[in-house]
Image (tube, rainbow, N blue to C red):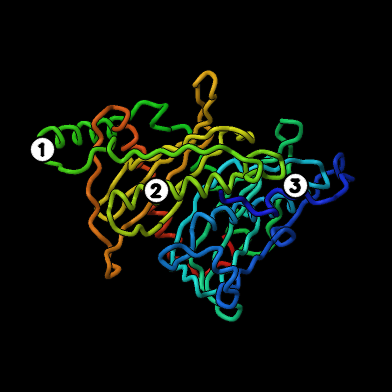
């Protein structure tokens, strides 16, 4: 059983003297946070994060990213002083843009990019190297929301001061607009448009006529079941969102490994939605399958459900999407076997994956272009 860090479930001792006070305008720099992992010199720490082929465990790092995003959000909103509960609403994106060697130090540099009424975006820049030569290798965006007694609570306005902070604020606004657009046009709740219907019909005909060979989407499905122990809790006595991210990612990685039969190379987390909190003692089902393939990459969707052992009913608490490539022994990117949807629901998942993949490609191209030009996400 892999526990979450004690830091994730430790409540700092602070007075709530600002609970009814006015909301102060705050700059990104006032809540900026840095964390260094000295993997180059601390062999004991490296041992905690290393995987079986000598790289870093991405899933464990995802857990830490969620914790860091929470720290920054609490700092900006003065959450402890104001008696707020800050929770993760979504991991919006995580893009890997470079290598993550386990023998180099790792730096997490996080700050608030954008603020709405009760929500805020925290950007995290992940860099590899040492204090004299940091090289950005990934970026992450988390959406955090403030609650008080179960209701949305207003948060401190953000005042960007530098051109760099203003750029990040505007980009955060644009990401918020895209999130709302994706929500309004979710293929699983809104009927496909004409172009999407034509794509789905063309795909169906190519599969039926034998012109497209590949693997059945249903055959890629894998599932695991977990009992949620108190060691997995967060400061709110719910299951820590970072732990769920780690478990979902590792299932997606395993599915990719089984599908490609070669080591997966992680590219990005497209999105992880947090719909409902997970209670201690819950039985969780993690179900994943490949929902889209391109010639050189694939996307895995992972759904987390809490199961009532008495009634047998279930409720979805999280949905997440992960994109991978696969590498041969020489480190070359492999051709991916096409995944074939055989039902209408699988066809909708394929369309959803296709849309997310195209948007992700644009985001990765932009991220690669800016990888050395900004101080945080």
Secondary element under disc 2, as helix, strand or loop, is helix
**Crowd around label 2: few <14 · some 14–19 · many ≥20 (10 Å):** few
377 to the left or right of 220: right
**Residue marked by disc 3:** 156
Secondary element under disc 3, as helix, strand or loop, is loop
Instruction: Residue 150: give its label.
Output: none
Taking the spot 11% from the left edge, 40% from the top edge, the residue there is: 211
Q: Say whether disc 2 or disc 3 marks the residue closer to the N-terminus.
A: 3
Q: Nearer the viewer, mark 2 or mark 1?
A: 1
* Place of residue 104 in the rendered image (x, y in percent of width and height, measured from the top left): 52, 75
Task: Using the image as rendered, state which of residue 244 and residue 164 is in the foreground.
Answer: 244
* Place of residue 156 in the rendered image (x, y in percent of width and height, measured from the top left): 75, 47
Position above or below: 173 against 205: below
Q: Let me know if residue 337 appears in the view.
A: yes
* Place of residue 175 in the rendered image (x, y in percent of width and height, measured from the top left): 52, 47
Taking the spot 64% from the left edge, 36% from the top edge, the residue there is: 280
Instruction: Residue 359: give its label.
Output: 2
Q: Let me know if residue 119 appears in the view.
A: no
Q: In the rendered structure, are the residues bearing label 2 and label 1 in contact, judged by CB atoms less than 8 Å apart?
A: no
**Residue marked by disc 1:** 210
Q: Say whether disc 1 or disc 3 marks the residue closer to the N-terminus.
A: 3
Task: Using the image as rendered, state which of residue 321 and residue 103 is in the foreground.
Answer: 103
* Place of residue 330 in the rendered image (x, y in percent of width and height, measured from the top left): 27, 70
Q: Say whether disc 2 or disc 1 marks the residue closer to the N-terminus.
A: 1
Q: In the rendered structure, are the residues bearing label 1 and label 3 in contact, judged by CB atoms less than 8 Å apart?
A: no
What's the distance in space between the residues labelled 2 and 1, CA to CA?
Answer: 29 Å
Task: Using the image as rendered, state which of residue 315 and residue 209 is in the foreground.
Answer: 315
Taking the spot 75% from the left edge, 54% from the top edge, the residue there is: 26
What's the distance in space between the residues labelled 1 and 3, CA to CA?
Answer: 58 Å
**Crowd around label 3: few <14 · some 14–19 · many ≥20 (10 Å):** many
**Crowd around label 1: few <14 · some 14–19 · many ≥20 (10 Å):** few
């Amino acid at each position: 059983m892999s526990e979450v860090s004690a830091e994730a479930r430790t409540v700092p001792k602070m007075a709530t003297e600002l609970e009814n006070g006015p909301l102060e305008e705050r700059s990104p720099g006032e809540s900026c946070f840095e964390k260094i992992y000295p993997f180059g010199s601390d062999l004991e720490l490296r041992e905690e994060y290393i995987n079986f082929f000598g790289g870093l465990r991405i899933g464990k790092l995802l857990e830490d990213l969620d914790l860091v995003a929470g720290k920054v959000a609490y700092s900006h909103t003065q959450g402890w002083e104001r008696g707020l509960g800050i929770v993760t609403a979504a991991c919006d994106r995580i893009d890997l843009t470079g290598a993550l060697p386990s023998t180099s130090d790792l730096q997490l540099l996080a700050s608030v990019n954008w603020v709405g009424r009760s929500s805020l975006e925290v950007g995290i820049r992940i860099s590899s190297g040492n204090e004299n030569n940091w090289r950005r290798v990934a970026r992450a965006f988390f959406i955090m929301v403030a609650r008080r007694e179960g209701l949305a609570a207003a948060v401190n306005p953000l005042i960007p001061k530098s051109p760099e902070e203003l750029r990040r604020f505007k980009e955060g606004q644009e990401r918020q607009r895209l999130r709302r657009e994706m929500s309004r046009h979710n293929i699983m709740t809104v009927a496909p448009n004409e172009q999407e219907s034509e794509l789905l019909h063309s795909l169906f005909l190519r599969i039926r006529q034998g012109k497209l060979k590949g693997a059945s989407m249903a055959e890629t499905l894998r599932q695991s079941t977990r009992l949620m122990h108190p060691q997995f809790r967060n400061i709110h006595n719910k299951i820590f969102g970072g732990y769920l991210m780690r478990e979902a990612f590792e299932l997606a990685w395993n599915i990719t490994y089984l599908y490609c039969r070669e080591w997966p190379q992680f590219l990005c987390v497209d999105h992880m939605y947090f719909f409902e909190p997970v209670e201690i003692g819950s039985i969780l089902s993690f179900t994943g399958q490949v929902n889209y393939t391109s010639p050189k990459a694939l996307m895995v969707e992972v759904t987390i459900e809490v199961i009532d052992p008495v009634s047998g009913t279930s409720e979805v608490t999280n949905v997440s999407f992960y994109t991978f490539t696969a590498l041969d022994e020489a480190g070359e990117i492999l051709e991916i076997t096409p995944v074939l949807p055989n039902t209408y629901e699988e066809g909708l998942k394929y369309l959803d994956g296709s849309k997310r993949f195209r948007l992700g490609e644009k985001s990765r191209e932009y991220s690669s272009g800016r990888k050395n030009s900004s101080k945080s996400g």
